[in-house]
Amino acid sequence: MSSPLRIAFVPGVTITKWSRIWHDRRRDTDLEFVPTAVPEQASVLANDLADVSFVRLPVATEGLSVIRLYDEDHVVVASVDDAIADLDEVTLAQLDGYTLHDPAGSVDDAIALIAAGVGAIVLPHAIARAHNRKDLVSRPVTDAPQTQIAVAWLAEGETPDIEEFVGIVRGRSANSSRANPTPPAEKPAKVVKPGAKGAPKAANAAAGGKAKAKRKPYATSGGAEAKNRSGSPNSPKARNARKRKGR
């Protein structure tokens, strides 16, 4: 078995879905998970502690390949006894005057202080959900900038395993390939039903259709003047012509 592919991820990012797909397709290579904090989300790549890192933007992109995956809303976390608990949502202006803890610091320490009634904190929704407690509430902050989640790796250190894992994250199926794209499907030939307008005569005949024969006029003894529209020699007009001729 080859060396494991090392995957770093910041708090609030769930990679269970992608790791499950990887194990279904690549049982020959394990994944090794490296939890990391936002300040170290890029340095784990530079220091060869991880092969791929799930990061929160912005991140210094020099030397990195970065693909944005999705956006995440922010919420404010406060004590269940705070006035914020009576609101459905808040704005940043409504948080003026609050002691807001720094989300770049220890979230665990901030949560403990908030539960004791000291201040509040604005966090990405996934992180707040991970710290959910009965003595806390979270409310959407409608005008807070969204957090952008991305996947990053060293541009010069890309390997087939990294490329395949990033493809899984981006939704590439097991049968798709950059080198062998799926060719466009050919349009089926138009089928014309026998007897339909525009159908070839040969097709109609092959299908059992009856070809119309050209009608030949009946021959008469009375010549051309004895023929009627149907060409019958027994029509009244033909008989009268023969009588006049016999006079």
Image (cartoon, rainbow, N blue to C red):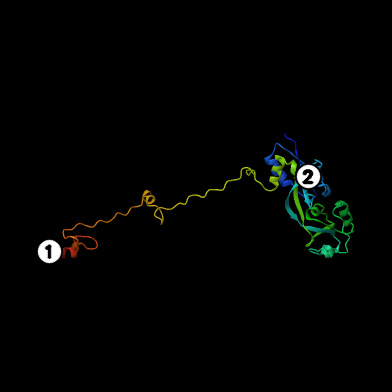
Quadrant that contains the N terminus? top right
Q: How much space separates mark 2 and mark 1, taking CA atoms?
A: 116 Å
Report the front residue among 218 and 133. Answer: 218
Q: Quadrant of residue 51?
A: top right
Q: Position of residue 16 (x, y in %)?
A: 73, 46
Q: Secondary structure at mark 1?
A: helix
In the rendered structure, the answer to whether residue 52 lies left or right of residue 103 reads left
In the rendered structure, the answer to whether residue 164 lies left or right of residue 243 reads right
| Residue type marked 2 | Ala
Q: Residue at x 80, y 43 (%)?
A: 46
Sequence-wise, the earlier of marks 2 and 1 is 2
In the rendered structure, the answer to whether residue 142 lies left or right of residue 241 reads right
User: Where 25 sits versus 58, above or below?
Assistant: above
Q: Residue furthest top?
A: 1
Query: Disc 2 designates what residue?
Result: 8
Report the front residue among 18 and 156. Answer: 156
Q: Please state the total of marks drawn on the protein image.
A: 2
Q: Residue furthest left?
A: 247
Q: Residue at x 74, y 55 (%)?
A: 71
Q: Residue at x 39, y 50 (%)?
A: 203
Q: Position of residue 105 (x, y in %)?
A: 87, 52
Name the mark on residue 245. 1
Q: Secondary structure at mark 2?
A: strand
Task: Answer whether labels 2 and 1 touch (C-beta < 8 Å).
Answer: no
Q: For the residue carrying disc 1, how many other residues have a C-alpha within 10 Å: few (<14), some (14-19), or many (20+)?
A: few
Q: Position of residue 143 (x, y in %)?
A: 78, 62
| Residue type marked 1 | Lys
Q: Position of residue 111 (x, y in %)?
A: 86, 54
Report the front residue among 223 and 50. Answer: 223
Report the front residue among 116 and 219. Answer: 219
Quadrant that contains the C terminus? bottom left
